[in-house]
Amino acid sequence: MVKNTKEIMSKIRKETERCNMDNISRTVFYHRFYQRNTEIKWAFLASMVSRNAGWSMCDLQGEWFPRALNKKQLMNFFMTYERANWTIFDDAAPQLLLYEYCKRMNMSFLDLVQELDISSFIVEEWEKFFQSRNEERLMTALIINEQHVIEGPVMEHDIYAKEVFHSFFFTVQDWFHFSTVLFPTLEGELYGLSVSRFRHTKNRIVLGKKLAKLLFHPKYYPKFYRFASTISPTGSRFDYECNMGKKREGPMLRQAYPVILHHRGKKRDWYNGQALVKKMLENDVRLPPELALSNWYEKKRSEIRIAIEIENLLIKKSRD
């Protein structure tokens, strides 16, 4: 039995650190948390987006990307995914765990939340949630918060900004929508949305809101939930391609990468009453008419392979 605030916070910090080991441990945490607390919809969204990050990480050690990028570039791209993944979890997991503790033990969340090093924006939104029980608003607030949380330590970080976000490869990938967030089904179907102009916070938030709308769409949610509850994450695209009749390509995440030890820098409160943030809470988003991406996916996978082959031929020709 937890007796006091100090003990609660100690348990939360230990659990956060334990589950923030790598992409797979984060994905599993988010999904299991959602299964226990289905009113916190953001947790399911986070688990599905985290799966996509894992697939992207493993792609870097697959057959094709090592042909286009050197080892330093591959590691920079991996560390960008990993650091963003880690930073969001480090901020969000304590909020989720505290909510669950207080729910289970009938304690006041609002009396304890000030102990967490989180933004004043999300504290205010948790307060509103306890008053209104508006699950959609809280999910949107957590989307907005997470994207601002990674702005300084990841998007504006000197190395990531220069070596990744302003690199030619990232620009090409962004331009041709090679990076896409996919929600698979056990029937081998793929649904999702493309990431465009990823560097801009507003665009990432809009994408997050659209993904949430797709994930919880009454027509598709049961399919996505069955997939997530059935297929354990390995960080490999084979997690969903196995339902598409494909053979495994590339390694699983824990075969490809070691556990990364992160340094937690000094956090700052990103929120200072920006009016735009409040508007983004209330503005609705529309889904595009075409959400099934199975055919699109096959085409784009072929295109990126062709692009890499052409690049290698040009490099080889320039050396001859």
Image: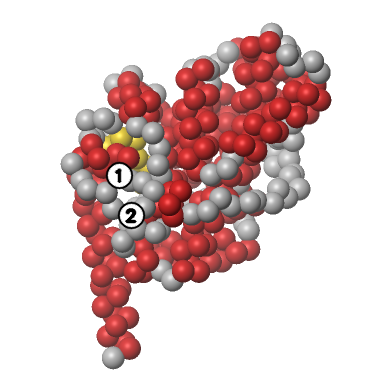
Residue 304, image x, y percentages: 28, 60
Q: Which residue is mark 2?
A: 250
Of labels 2 and 1, earlier in sequence is: 1
Residue 119, image x, y percentages: 71, 35
Q: Which corner quadrant of the image does residue 111 belong to?
A: top right
Screen quadrant of the N terminus: top right
Nearer-the-camera pick, 145 or 48: 48
Is 149 on the left-hand or right-hand side of 2? left
Nearer-the-camera pick, 263 or 224: 263
Residue 223, image x, y percentages: 30, 25
- Residue 126's disc is none
Nearer-the-camera pick, 53 or 16: 16
- Residue 238's disc is 1
What kind of element bears circle 1? helix
CA neighbours of label 1 inside 10 A, class few (<14), some (14 to 19), many (20+): many
- Residue type at numbered disc 1: Phe
Is 103 on the left-hand or right-hand side of 295? right
